[in-house]
Image (tube, rainbow, N blue to C red):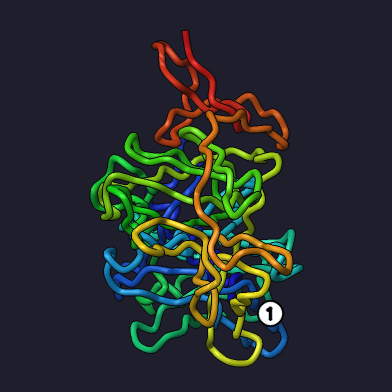
Amino acid sequence: MIVTLLTFVVSSAFAQLDTDKYKYYRVQNSKSLRYVSVRDGIGSIDKNKFTADFKAIDIISGIENVISDPGSIIGIVDEGAGYYGLEAQGTSVSEIVSGVSIIIVENEDGTYLVCGTAKGSKGGISGSGNAYLLDPGTGEDLSFIVSTAAGARTKGTGNWKVYPVDSDDDSNYFGVDMNLYAEGKYYTTLYTSFAYTLSPDMTAYAISDVADGKVTLQDLGSFVPEETPVILESSFSSASANRLQPVEGGGSVPGNLLSGVYFNHNRGGIHTVRTAFDKNSMRVLKVVDGEITLSDEGDEYLPANSAYLSVPAGTPSVLKFGVKTAIMEIQSDQDKTGRIYDLQGRQVRNPQQKGIYIVDGKKVVGK
């Protein structure tokens, strides 16, 4: 399923794909106008029976319904020779399905076909041709057709657009709705597979200690590394005011006690991928008596892309916020590529002015 999702992402990506400038995109079918969103990390393609499991991918109408959805943010990596790597929600096509590569075919109207082929060969996934990704336009699932490019193109439902996610683009940004309010601030938690920079009025916290019924909060500054569970604080509640810019950047937050989950999916069978809340070992963000706290009162299952605090037996049912420490330095754990990005996630080849840039997952002040 994830394979499908990633595949369609690639096709749309080509419409506005520029991997030197952006890594993260949304993918939309040009006919149904529905967006792709990854809901779990399970999928498969049977190359012999021409069947596939796409239930890990939701097809969603309306940009307003994906604007705050991390599952709709697709990372696209140019692997050369016409092949692309697709990433979302902590997984990738290559991790889900071995032996299949993703290629794209450009259409005259600027849209793209996306297909899976036998790894290392553009000659086809079978004797009948490649497997092209389709959105039937109705129902919950994607489908595919084993065909030639010309045959797939005539279907119309296999043409995809791709849009870079940009915090300055009012039509395609990623923002966060803050659903908790206490003492003049709005709060939520977040856990994403991509790194991001924050809007000016936002703060991201890790938790570095728990003692005497209180948690110590560590301010992460304006940059949050990939796969980092955090508590977000803002002066505003709406996603449009709380925009995050996905950027390419690894790193780690030493001593962060928060944990995160990607999925809360319930399609049945292997696609029931969710984490049950356990009040004996977990604390989740909640307003108690007008204060923002970490509480033992939560929903039956943890929300997708949320963070929680694991605690030992005997921990107080409510943990209050204690000391908020100064901005900490992020430790980079990725290969040092030397690539430079601005705070909008765009690669900068020759920075000419003062400002803050992201280099190898760290914030650097240009002089």
Spot occupied by residue 232 in the image (x, y as percentages of width and height) = 44, 49
Position of residue 96 in the picture relative to residue 261 (left or right): right
Query: Could you say where residue 110 lies in the image, as x and y percent from the top left?
Result: 34, 55
Q: Which of the 4 quarters of the picture holds residue 278?
A: bottom right
Q: For mark 1, what is the residue?
A: 127
What's the residue at 57%, 68% (across, down)?
317
Name the residue rendered at 50%, 49% in the picture: 321
Residue extending farthest to the top is 367
What kind of element bears circle 1?
A: loop
Q: Is residue 106 visible?
A: no
Q: Amino acid at mark 1?
A: Gly
The image quadrant where one finds the N terminus is bottom right
Looking at the image, is 68 positioned above or below residue 341?
A: below
Name the side, left or right, on which 98 lies relative to 103. Answer: right
Q: Looking at the rendering, which quadrant does residue 106 occupy?
A: bottom left
At a point 60% along the width and 85% down the height, the residue shown is 272
Taking the view exactly as shown, the residue that stands out farthest to the front is: 212
- Left of 119 or right of it: where is 70? left
Residue displayed at 27% across by 69% down: 62
Q: Is residue 258 above or below residue 243?
A: below
Which residue is nearer to you in this view: 117 or 223? Answer: 223
